[in-house]
Image: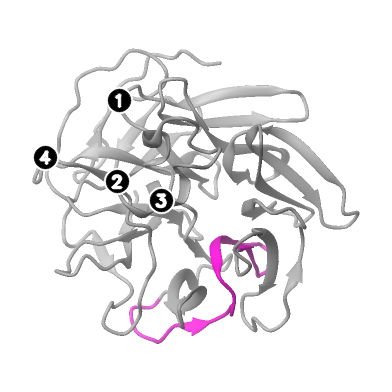
Amino acid sequence: MKNTSLFLTLIVSAALVVSCGPGKYNQETYAPEESGLNVMKITDESTTSVFAPKVFSSLVGDFASSTFAGSKKERMFWATPRLLAVSPEGDQIAFLSDVNKQRNIMTKRTALQGAATQRTFRNVYDFSWGMDDNLYYADFTNVTDVLIASTNAYSGSLIRQLTNNNEDYSPVLTEDGSLLFFTRVDNSGPSIWSLNLKTGALTSCARGYSPAIVPGDNNKFLCVRNSTKGTSEIWLIDYMIGQETLILSDPSRGYSNPVLSPDGQWILCQGNAKSNISRKMNLDIFAVKIDGTQCIQLTYHPAEDCCPAWSADGKSVYFLSARANKKNMYNVWKMRFM
């Protein structure tokens, strides 16, 4: 496990830099509010309903009594499901929308104009977009069972059921399309499993939840674990050799929903932070180096910002936010990273 003293570096004019990692924390340094030219709204709540958990209410209802949360509700306040994805080509985004009293995956071109297309007709908990252009999702249409299924991102016609367990979540496909990592929950808590899509072999890899792939290395993945103090942390796991590295931890905040950049250098995640405007705790988007040596707060709007996703070229960040509307409705937003 790392115990690295991390340094503060201001690298963009619209970023809040914070100390991060399992070491002792320095005083935070604040920079100006995000520039309006840096952040763009991709969806319109007047025509498309974008679903995102209401962090302080529905998450407690979804998780507080589950084995994710253990005995402390606050452990899961910041661990929203993966609700936003970008196509491998970078020309489409996918998100959840409430359609006919169900949460379904919608796809839309990344251009600012254009309607969204419904791709699933099930109740979807969370999902990802695979390199094979299939959408992999946790299906909870049957409320007593949550299983992993897939459908094509462009046709959405055929459904392939991949697991039979009653609590499987957060599937992600490796870059070569051979393995599917996902979260499985049982009486001992959440753990990461892999499914070989050719042989059907299932492997229990490590404890944790919300896996994220490491491009080019099927033996490694990122995941989230809960600390003994009740905060969520980002870990890098090499399950073939049993190496587990703590990347991002803070006794005063939780981090979750990690996703690695296309070049393998930066991890996007979400974390709880206090707004300079409202002085209340909310969710914001963070980036940290893969070795844990630098942590940057990318958003600090008083509205919730969550579920980050990289653009295909790694130069921009997509995320869900309830900013810029009076009804607290979520939209997909995009901002430049570097």
Q: Residue furthest right?
A: 199
The chosen color scheme is one colour
Res. 252 mark: 1
**3D distance between C-alphas at marks 1 and 3:** 23 Å
Res. 150 mark: none
Q: Is residue 212 above or below residue 100?
A: above
Residue 163: image location, x then y, percent = 76, 57
Q: Quadrant of residue 19?
A: top left
Q: Is residue 109 visible?
A: no
Q: Amino acid at mark 1?
A: Ser
Q: Quadrant of residue 147?
A: bottom right
Q: Marks 3 and 2: CB-CB under 8 Å?
A: no
Question: Which residue is drawn at the image coordinates 58% and 31% (left, top)?
Answer: 236
Q: Amino acid at mark 4?
A: Arg
Res. 279 mark: 4
Boundaries of the magenta span: 111-139
Category of crowding for the residue at label 4, using alpha-carbon neighbours closer than 10 angstroms: few (below 14), some (14–19), many (at least 20): few
Instruction: Give the mark nearest the N terminus, 3 or 2.
Output: 3
Left or right, 133 with respect to 119, comes to right
Question: Which residue is drawn at the image coordinates 10% and 45% (left, top)?
Answer: 278
Instruction: Say which residue label 2 marks.
Output: 283
Instruction: Say which residue label 3 marks.
Output: 61
Q: Marks 1 and 2: CB-CB under 8 Å?
A: no
Which of the two residues, 241 or 31, is positioned nearer the viewer here?
A: 241
Element under label 4?
loop
Residue 4: image location, x then y, percent = 44, 14
Which of the two residues, 239 or 69, is positioned nearer the viewer here?
A: 69
